Image (cartoon, grey):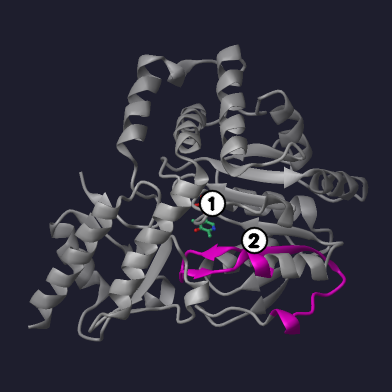
Amino acid sequence: MFLTFNPGPSQISQATIKDIGEAIDRSILSISHRSEQFKDIFRLAVENLRRYLCISESYKILFVSSATEAMEIVLRNCAGRSSFHFVNGAFSERFYKIAEMIGKDPVKLVAEYGKGFDLSEVNIPDQCDLICITHNETSTGYRWDYQEIQEVRSKYPGKIISVDIVSSALSEPLPVEEADIWFFSVQKVCGLPAGLGVIILNEKVISKSRELVERGSDIGSFHSLPVLYEKAEKYQTFETPNILNIFLFYKAMGRLCKIGIDEIEKKTREKAHIIYSWLEAHEHLRPFIEDPEHRSLTVVTVFLPEWIKCGVLAEKLGEMNIVIGRGYGDFSDSQFRIANFIAHSRKDVMVLIKSVDEVLERIGK
Ligand SMILES: *Cc1c(COP(=O)(O)O)cnc(C)c1O
C-alpha cells in the first residue's frame, strides 16, 4: 500500500476499506436500487451530509456520477442563454469549456493562474443568468474566501450562483445560503472511490430549470434537475446508481458527524499550517500561491527549484511508496501538489515532508 497525496483519486481511509468489506458481507453490492434497503441507505447518506454541513431543509441533496457531470447539469439547468465564469485554473476553465460545448455562449473573466479577481472591477453582463465559481482551484491551489462569494451574491442577487467545491467540501463549514447550487465529487477530500457526485441546491434553481423547459431549452433527460429532484424526494434515482459509493458515503458521513466539522476544520488548518510553514522556511521550495489569504487549505501547490523536475521527485518518492500530485498543465515539471484531505493524518504529512527533504538533499549534492 502506498501513501498518496495526489489530489484525486486520493487516499482512502482504513475505515472506508472496512466499509467496502461490510458492503460485501451484507450483499449491498447486489441489492435492488428499488428496495427499501437502498432507500434507507440513500436517506441516511443525505441525512448525514445534511447534519454534518448543517444544510437547512430548504436545500436539497442529489446524487450524480461526477463533478464534471454536475457542471453540465448546472449549465443546462440554470443558464438560459449564457453563463459567466471566473477562470484562474484548469477546473474553472473546464466549467467554461463545457458551457461552450453545449452551446451556452459563456463569458469568462480570466485571471492569471494562481491569482484572484478584483471584485470591484467585475461587471457581469445581463444576459448571464448563471455565475460559476470554483471555490478551490485544484490545479493551482488558489482558494476563494467565502466572503468574496458573498460579495458577488450581494452585487447580483437576481442571478444564480453555482460553486464548485470539489476539492474543499467537507473540510470546513459551508455557508450554504451564500450560493444557490454547490457540487463536489467524493474521490477528493472525502477519500472515497471515484464515481459519485453530490449536488446541493435550493428551490430557486429548480424553478429556474422548469422555466427553461417552458422556454424550450434542453435541460437534459434523466439527470435534469427536476427529474433528479423528484426521484431524490423518494430516495431514488432514475437509473441504477452507484450503490456501493452511496453506501460508503453514508458510512463516511456518519463518522464525520461524530467528529464534527469544527474538529475536521481545525485538523485541516493545522496540517495546512505545518506544510506552508515548512515551505516558507525552505531553502529550495516555495508555495505557488503568494497571497496567504488565498492559499488552499486542502491542495498545496509547490514550486520546485530548477535543478529538480517534478517527475524525478515523484519517481524518488515513489520508491518510498509515496505519491505526490504532479504540477498541472504548463507547470507539470516545475511544480508538485500536496493534498491535505481528511484521510491524511498529521503523521502522514510529517512523513511526506521528511521524505521530500531527503530526496532534495540527495539530489542536490
Ligand atoms: C477534480 C475536480 C473536478 C472534476 O471532478 P470529477 O469528479 O473528476 O468530474 C472538478 N472541479 C474541481 C475543482 C476538481 O478538483
**Is 123 one of the magenta-colored residues?**
yes
The answer to which of marks 2 and 1 sits earlier in the sequence is: 2
Q: Which of 244 and 249 is in front in this view?
A: 249
Where residue 275 sits in the image (x, y, percent)? Answer: 32, 67
Which one is in front in this view, the residue at disc 2 or the one at disc 1? Answer: 1
Local SS, label 1: loop
**Image quarter (top left, top right, bottom left or bottom right) of the N terminus:** top left
Q: Name the kind of residue labelled 2 in the image.
A: Ile
Mark 1, residue position: 169
Q: Up-down: is 212 above or below 57?
A: below
Identify the residue shown where x is 44% and y is 43%: 194
Q: Which of 80 and 287 is in front in this view?
A: 287
Outermost residue, right direction? 214
Mark 2, residue position: 98
**Is 281 one of the magenta-colored residues?**
no
Q: Nearer the viewer, residue 111 or 77?
A: 111
- Label of residue 241 in the image: none
Q: Up-down: is 234 above or below 46?
A: above
Q: Crowding near pointer 2: few (<14 within 10 Å), some, many (20+)? A: some
Q: How many circles with numbers are drawn on the protein?
A: 2
Local SS, label 2: helix
Q: Name the kind of residue labelled 1 in the image.
A: Ala
Lateral position of residue 249 relative to residue 24, left or right: right
Q: Give the range drawn in magenta.
A: 119-148
Lateral position of residue 96 relative to residue 170, left or right: right
**Image quarter (top left, top right, bottom left or bottom right) of the C terminus:** bottom left
Report whether residue 351 is seen: yes
